[in-house]
Image: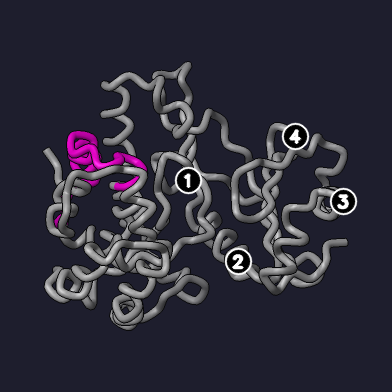
Amino acid sequence: MLPLVETDEEWDAVVPDESVMRPGAEALCARLGVGGLPLERFAEGSVPVYAVGDAHVLKLFPAASAADGLVEERVLDRLRGALPIPTPELRAAGAYVNGWRYVLMSRLPGEGLAPAWPRVPQPDRERIAHDCGEALAALHALDPEPLADALGPGDWSAFLARQQAGAVARQRGRGLPEAWSEQIPDFLATAPLPRAPRRALLHTEFMREHLLTDPADGWRLTGLFDFEPAMIGDPAYDLVAVGLFTTRADPHLLGHLLRGYGRDVDPRLLMAYTLLHVYSNLPWYLRELKPSAGTLDALAEEWFGVV
């Protein structure tokens, strides 16, 4: 049986420990009718995720993140066949023991786009970017209201106010130099942030690490996964992860993606959402992307401008 996990200390002691996790996962698989199949834990992911044979994936959520399990369950059910990129099909979901939740889903075919990217020819990268834009447009066109009881943040204006109030302290706490952090208040004060935007279903982490591709089929995208951080809010919020981790500050690729998406977006808005994102870590982004810009305004153009 899996023990109760409610604190960071319990998480660190239990979640990485396969001598604890694996027997619990095996028992659950037997209960779900997929016992006896090979069980292999994926190295990636903040919560335990297992390949169950060739056809299934089991994702486990301890009590501390049980709400995320409910989000994943509800979003996968809503997305069934709705996007031009396949998403996992929900097989079963629910409560397990000691506050744990589970989601059993279909296993998508293909190779991770992030590790495959260096081998992808430029024309295929451009097509992939365009296809990503079309998939995001389809996601954002769905009515999010059936999910409003499970997905936050609720009042978008209040969410932005909370994020804005803590933006400087959050980035300083992650090691942002003062030359950058002192620019944040004025930049956010003048950014074109909509207080009551059109509400859309957001992935929030739409990036290469959550996409699959088939190199034998012209690098066709074969899967989009990991919906536990999904939210409802301004569609532009979803383009932060896109610009930083899918097109990675490449204005040519972002241009292809936005043409597939069907709209242009103000780079200053995306830079503002970069600072306000729930997972924002500007020092890390600066280390990863190594921009030449020295101001937030210039950084907005360098990371989110298009050609």
Q: CA distance from mark 1 to mark 3?
A: 33 Å
Amino acid type, mark 1: Gly
Check disc 3: other Cα within 10 Å, few if <14, some if 14-19, many if 20+: few
Q: Nearer the viewer, mark 1 or mark 3?
A: 3
Q: Amino acid at mark 4?
A: Gly
Labelled pair 3, 2 in contact (Cβ < 8 Å): no
- Gap in Å between the C-alphas at discs 3 and 2? 23 Å
Q: Residues within 10 Å of mark 2 (few under 14, many from 20)?
A: many
Q: Gap in Å between the C-alphas at discs 4 and 2?
A: 24 Å
**Which percent across, then down, holds residue 44?**
60, 44
List the residue tagged with mark 1.
Answer: 81
* Element on which disc 2 rests: helix
**Which residue lies under the disc numbered 2?**
70
Report the span colored magenta: 244-267
Q: Looking at the image, tell me whether mark 4 or mark 3 is earlier in sequence order.
A: 3
Badge 3 amino acid: Pro
Q: Main secondary structure of the magenta part?
A: helix
Mark 4 or mark 1, which has the lower sequence index? 4
Q: Residue furthest front?
A: 178
The residue identified by callout 3 is 23
Residue visible at 48% across and 43% down? 210
Disc 3 or 2, which lies upstream in sequence? 3
Disc 2 to disc 1, how far (Cα)?
Answer: 19 Å
Residue ID for mark 4:
53
